[in-house]
Amino acid sequence: MSEQDLRDSLQQAVWDEPPLDFDPDTFMARAEQLTRRRRALMSVGVATALIIATVATLPAFLTSGRNRVESATGVSTTSSATTPSTLNFPWPPNDVKRRGHTYLEDQPFLASMWEVVISPALQHEGAEVSSIGTWSPDFQPSAYARDRSVNDILMGSVDYVGPTGAAQLNITLAGPGGWGPTPEGMCRNLPDPSTCSPVKRPDGSVVVAVELGGKTGSGGFYTGERTVYHYRKDGSVVGMTSRPRLADPNAALGVSVPMNFDQLTRLATNESITLPN
């Protein structure tokens, strides 16, 4: 047997034996120290994992909670920037006086406003000039009128062709004190499916953005129209509603609403679109 073979044989015979200077007490103390360190690291790891999991699931939990509240109240909001409880917008404003508008008196003003303000604004939003029909508004009954009055809310629609095809714009003008529902009330009274978002503007007025859905003959749902109501500080309201003009209502599924909320907001907040003082 060679010297190397002898060395290998001796190493195999004693490989699992402790070294000559082995101290059992020192060994156990070191083992306990390593065990405590390992447990501490595991605790930190578990705590970190729980924090990450909590942060990751918190938005979903809040969203779920908001959806449950919306389901309970029957209102679905598109924006949480301003909620009805934080609007702080009394309606109607104090000491607002009804003016008792009549179409005969207002007709010259309305005709001029259409020619100078509304029609150009509609063209700016993409309406083809030659396609714009006649706007023939009139004071008429409305479910939103206060005191069942018909002489302070004017409504009228106009047909046109825009980037998405045949379209219709409905215009509502309510004189000071003529509009009943508060901004919050508009959102509470909408049918399903719908969305509603009241937002207070920097100038103190309020914009309510509404999107209503519809049901086709086959039972499918679609977005039927969008409306923006501008609640003004003088107690008046201007509403702009956009919807596609369809010969067959069953063809509404998949058809885009002509105007988006930004376009409708520009029209509704145009201070030149109003009833005469």
Image: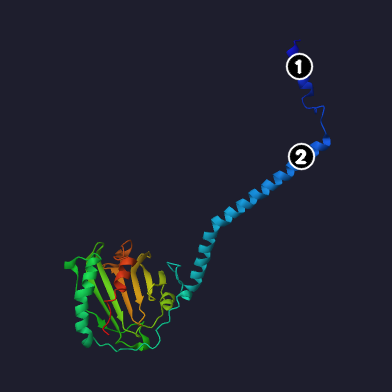
Specify the label residue 31 is tagged with.
2
Q: Position of residue 164 (x, y in %)?
A: 26, 62
- Residue type indicated by callout 1: Arg
Is residue 73 shown above or below 90?
A: above
Tell me what residue is drawn at x 51 percent, y 72 percent.
72
- Residue type indicated by callout 2: Ala
Which quarter of the image is occupied by the N terminus? top right
Image position of 168 (left or right of 85)? left
Is residue 27 shown above or below 70?
A: above
Tell me what residue is drawn at x 70 percent, y 44 percent.
38
Give residue 198's quadrant in the image: bottom left
Q: Where is residue 254 in the image (x, y as percent from the top left)?
A: 33, 61
**Within-10-Å neighbours for mark 1: few <14, some 14–19, many 20+:** few
Q: Check the image and name the residue furthest to the left.
A: 130
Tell me what residue is drawn at x 75 percent, y 42 percent.
33
Q: Which of 246 and 267 is in front in this view?
A: 267
Q: Is mark 2 on a helix, strand or loop?
A: helix
Q: What element carries label 1?
A: helix
Q: Which of 137 and 74 is in front in this view?
A: 137
Name the residue tied to disc 1.
7
Answer with mark 2 or mark 1, whichever residue precedes in sequence.
Answer: 1
